[in-house]
Amino acid sequence: MRTTTGFPRVTAAAMVGPATVVVVLLLVLPLMLLLRYSLNRFIPGQFMVEALTAENYVKVFADPYYRNVLFLTAGIAALCTLLCLLIAYPAAYLLARTRSRYKSWLILLVVMPLFVGNAVRAAGWIVVFGQRGAFNAALQWLGIVNAPLEIMYTPLAVIVAITGFNLPFMVLTLQSVLEGIDPALEEAALGMGAPPMTAFRKVTLPLSLPGVVAGSMLCFILAMNAYATPVLLGGPRFQMMAPLVYTQISEQANWPLGGALAFVLMIATLLLTVGANTLVQRRYRRRGVL
Amino acid sequence: MKPRKSSLTLTRRRLIQAAAATGVAGMVGPRAAHAAGRCVVGTWGGDYQNLIQKNIVPLMPKDIEVVYDTGNDSPRKTKMLAEKPLPRGTMDISALSRAGSYEMYKAGTLLEIDFGKIPNSKNILEKVRVPYAIPHIYSGRVILYNPKFITEKPTSYNDLWNPKYKSKIGVIDIQYQTTIESAAMIAGGSMSNYEPGKAKLMELKKLDVKVVPTNEAMSQALKTEDIWMCIMWKARGVMWQNAGVPIEIAAPKEGVVLYVSDFTIPKNSPNKESAYAFMDAMLNPKAQEGFIDDMGYNPTVENVELASATAKRVGFTKEEAANLVLQDYDYLAKNDAQLKEWWDKEFKA
């Protein structure tokens, strides 16, 4: 029997099968186990006691500390996504429109930061942001400040580093969508007398929205789940969700609360991402753009 | 006449039997042969692991292969608890702080030590001997200060609360337990009641205390003179002095609380005899000496000659030795979670 694509059905199953098995074994089953653990009870000195209780979830939402960490994480993720979008769009536009023979080199430059791991990059930021780091040394040398600025262990350090880390993902996503937009459409708008900003706002931006949405989703999910950056640059007083999950599970051996926090983080990320996506799609579909 | 099957004929049944036998031999054979000579040591990585390899392993029987399972003690404890129902665990030795080994003993994961299998155990100092662990090294908690700014030698933890040193006092995030404990010692608390320490620490917070994430970050802050005074283990203080950090060491009159680093054997250790061999080598005076000079910790056996210059500096004076205090590990096991929660929610907020 053949499918509409022309592939025999058995081949299609064989193609999807291995990936499905890997996802079920390595993602779905551990998640189910974690979900079960999150309904257990933690009693100090006894580790995890078998139970079927929602108290860990109640604690996450009822306790202002955990609630604030969740809001702060979502806020930082949204801000970093917005910054990524603002910085990445012009770069992606240039990359998409350039006819330079160095274009592939420019794309390689965008990808290059991804060659280095997240933790290694955070270590690099530590060197830059320290009291005697490169940034402060430069500011003092230029006479802009007299005393070194406190950047390490502040939310600013985390925001800058997460934005820097996510930027290549946004640039590449936007660039691939912008490549697909025919320059003639923009030229037509300009030719009919639209100022460049209007042509951009009315033609290029709406057409590139699928890229904006996809890139933003990617950046937002990455920022919501950031671990190494907040731990290494945020310092002990700055708390985001992923490090909190790690602390509860690995340091406090409180798997039930750690599990509940992990699920809350996952569902919050999912809801916010899907919600924002639906909102944008509905708005532009109404205008007939998407 | 029915033809007889030759013994060389490959029937389907024989093929399956042969395949199964090969598989079983492949799974069990090499591992069983290996098990007698293997010892998996769950330990902190870095210098500690290197020093184990340098000082302890050469003193073990040559046919025992030591393999490391490196990580911090919190994940190690979690792993032991998770492996508790299994007949065969993954570690033969688990390195833990004394508070951790007590907690694991109470949770039923540790083997009671058979001291008869460890000839060197007769030399263990009485103060640190327990039935569920073999103490490896110990140190005591003291005050580290920069004499350039703190001109009067501190005598009490109270000196950290002096408003003169506002914003120049530091505490370490991962040392939340001992920091609350130190505050409790000057606020009417005890080893079995840290609660009064909480209000006392909130006073320190008003004096703009710096919270640094790790011990290493503290040594850096002391070196750059961003922090002038802190609470730390004496062993670390001596090592930091050796590394050129401008600090002096003072013992608080409230008492020097001991930090004991233990080695334990999980009940489900697959190679218990190898674990006992490791314990005996670890208590050998030669092995203990290596940890004094390289890590600044005191030996836990009485037959070690404290001859080197470092050994003299890491030890305690007679008065200090008379004022050594042991933690209440039962209190810590029951209260650690709430102490950490308070530290994160109230103190660091």
Image (tube, rainbow, N blue to C red):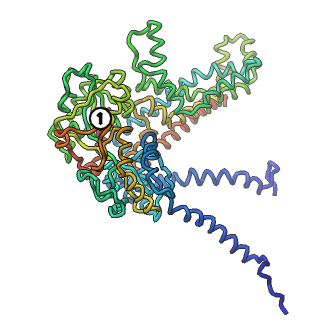
Q: Secondary structure at mark 1?
A: strand
In the rendered image, the quadrant that contains the C terminus of chain B is top left
Q: Nearer the viewer, residue B231 or A189?
A: B231
The chain holding disc 1 is B
Residue B34, percent across and down? 55, 61
Q: Is residue A160 visible?
A: yes
Residue lying at the far top in this picture: please name it: A143
Residue B82, percent across and down? 43, 56
Q: Is residue A260 visible?
A: no
Q: Residue at x 18, y 32 (%)?
A: B156
Q: Is residue B176 above or below residue A204?
A: below
Residue A100, image quadrant: top right
Q: Amino acid at mark 1?
A: Met
Q: Is residue B59 above or below residue A169?
A: below
Q: Nearer the viewer, residue A74 or A131?
A: A131
Q: Residue at x 41, y 9 (%)?
A: A145
Residue B57, percent across and down? 45, 50
Q: Which residue is mark 1?
A: B232
